Image: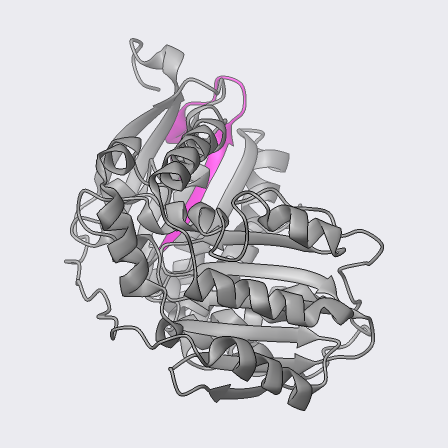
Amino acid sequence: MFNKIKLTAFALLVSAAGVAQEVEFTEYDLDNGLHVILHQDNTAPVVTVGVMYHVGAKDEEEGRSGFAHFFEHLLFEGTENIERGKWFDIVAANGGSNNANTTQDRTYYYETFPSNNLELGLWMESERMLHPVINEVGVETQNEVVKEEKRSRIDNAPYGKIIYSTGINKYVFDKHPYKNSVIGTMEDLDAAELSEFKAFFDKYYGPNNATLVVAGDIETEETKEMIEKYFAEVPKGNEVVRVSIEEEPITETITATEYDSNIQIPAKLFVYRTPSMLERDAYILDMISSILTDGRSSRMYKKMVDEEKTALQVLAFPRSQEDYGTYVMGALALGDTPLDTLATSMDEEIYKLQNELISEKEYQKLQNKFENRFVNSNSSIQGIASSLATYNVLYGDTDLINEEIEIYRNITREDIKRVANEYLNENQRLELDYLPASDKEQPKK
């Protein structure tokens, strides 16, 4: 992700009023297929312009991993009308900030400006879509940037292979491109020809594979006119064929060991392959995570950190994705605690979820947490813009920004028990020992 240019003279965040306010929006399509979402909020003179492309690491060719993430960087290089290296200067000079990020499923670019610079933001994003300069100089420059990012975020970062899944997904996925990391391999990027980068852009960065979001201090009709002015001329791209690869179910425990030269404290992880983010069960797994490790009163924290004093830290979280998800739970060993001891404690907590309904008190506390999270998720213009784009591109339902909380409200204690039994089983998981590199020649705990 690109370093942020700090917004000068304007605050980015617009606070919520303490209760969840319905996010009103207008959406429509241009003739070239670009989907447009507009959200008008005139409470602060700030506007965010974002474009989400429905392309991520899963869309890459075999042997060319890292292309989507590479384009997150490359498309800041410059355009026919924006001089190379000047993108960030233009944004900063006009009191704005910008950033971009890539996942397995999509890539998102955005600028946040004082609202009198709305037209500038629209022009810049139309330039990125219509007139990018993709040449050897830009590719070579960004290749070095990506290599340094990989070194700093994964290779030289403690637990980097857990945080970025490079030490996880290769075991959980066999055929699906989710097995590859978002950042890809340097060998693949080094081997790619310029023509391949140009072909990747032509295939995935057309308006019919994108959603434009404009949120903040705007006038809707005036904004529509600007969008028509800058984006209507972008030619429609080819229809994108979505990845459609089914994995066979995991039916036997996968065991693996990963070593990390940046750590001294080993960790034990259980990783499960789970349903698409579109499935209701993905929301239930999110709630299970909160039960297990959200705060000092959570089950795994109270038991393993406070009472047994076997774990320094505990974790449980779903990684929701468009085709499949993963569910990760684990613990960092305290002192000389054997990893098998951590595994036994985690299994005991899973067993409780599978065989006992959570209490009414715990259930109500859980609902309160998710209500609070829902309110906070729409507390900034920048966050609203990102959510609108995400719900449209990945869920196909923009109004989930208002309605998703109802899914959580309708989850029952019985649902939690059912989902724990359906997905969190020993024969359906990866059991990963994550060890210091210094342990490589020593017997595993």
Up the image or down, 30 lies above or below 77; here it is below
Residue 18 in the image, given as x and y percentages of width and height:
81, 72
Q: Residue at x 72, y 62 (%)?
A: 113
Nearest the viewer among 115 and 368 is: 115
Residue 324 in the image: above or below residue 267: below
Instruction: Tell me, yes or no, whether the highlighted magenta stretch contains residue 341.
Output: yes
What residue sits 81% from the left and 58% below the top?
Answer: 11
Q: Position of residue 167 (x, y in %)?
A: 33, 35
Q: Position of residue 150 (x, y in %)?
A: 42, 32
**Residue 272 location in percent, x, y?**
32, 51
Nearer to me, 403 or 203: 203
* Drawn side of residue 296 relative to residue 114, left or right: left
Which is more toward the observer, 8 or 285?
A: 8
Residue 233 placement: quadrant: bottom left
195 part of magenta stretch: no
176 relative position to 400: left or right:
left
Please tell me whether residue 151 is drawn above or below residue 443 in the rendered image. Answer: below
The residue at 19%/66% (across/down) is 244
Q: Please say whether residue 372 is visible from this viewpoint.
A: no
| Residue 227 appears in the picture as rendered | yes
Quadrant for the C terminus in the image: top left
Q: Is residue 100 left or right of residue 274?
A: right
Residue range highlighted in magenta: 326-344
